[in-house]
Amino acid sequence: MNRCPQPGCSWQALAASADGARTAYLEHVVTDHAGADDPDSVDWFERSPGETSERRSHDHERVVIVLEGDLVLHTEDDSIELSTSDSMLIEAGEPYHSENPGEHPCLGITAAAQGS
């Protein structure tokens, strides 16, 4: 059984596997503890095979973490290939977009970088 360590949160879940437990907990954190309008928020994303996101930038640094699958992050100067467990820092103000070049969905999170 997994329990959320956030004070006052009673969320708990049973999962058949460690990966299932991790995914359920991350989804809970993003859904219940992150504010979409808060620059310190955590955002969950899923890209279908062949899907490309809209180009965007942020006023603060963001960390992209791929939890499962493949993702290519395109910046002004580079294209970086990421796969399961890879991460990348995106500088404040840098335009970027992402695409899933793989044959399976890509799951991940983005979060404000510490100290940004």
Image (tube, rainbow, N blue to C red):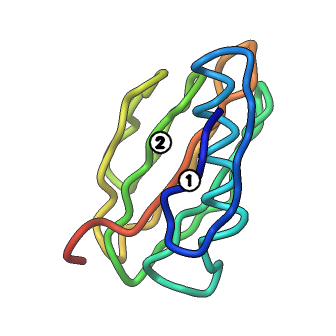
Q: In the visual, does 66 lie left or right of 15?
A: left
Q: Quadrant of the N terminus?
A: top right
Q: Nearer the viewer, residue 16 or 23?
A: 16
Q: In the visual, does 1 lie left or right of 50?
A: left
At which x and y percent is residue 3? 60, 47
The number of numbered badges drawn on the structure is 2
In the rendered image, the vertical position of residue 115 relative to residue 81, given as above or below: below
In the rendered image, the vertical position of residue 78 relative to residue 75, given as above or below: above
Q: Nearer the viewer, residue 55 or 85?
A: 85
At which x and y percent is residue 7? 50, 72
In the rendered image, the vertical position of residue 10 relative to residue 80, given as above or below: below
Q: Residue at x 39, y 84 (%)?
A: 59
Alpha carbon distance from label 2 to label 1: 6 Å
In this figure, which residue is indicated by the disc labeled 1? Answer: 97
Nearest to N terminus: mark 2 or mark 1? 2
At which x and y percent is residue 90? 33, 58
At which x and y percent is residue 65? 44, 42
Mark linked to residue 73: 2
Give SS at disc 2: strand
Q: Residue at x 40, y 37 (%)?
A: 79
Q: Amino acid at mark 1?
A: His
Q: In the visual, does 34 lie left or right of 76?
A: right
Q: Residue furthest left?
A: 115
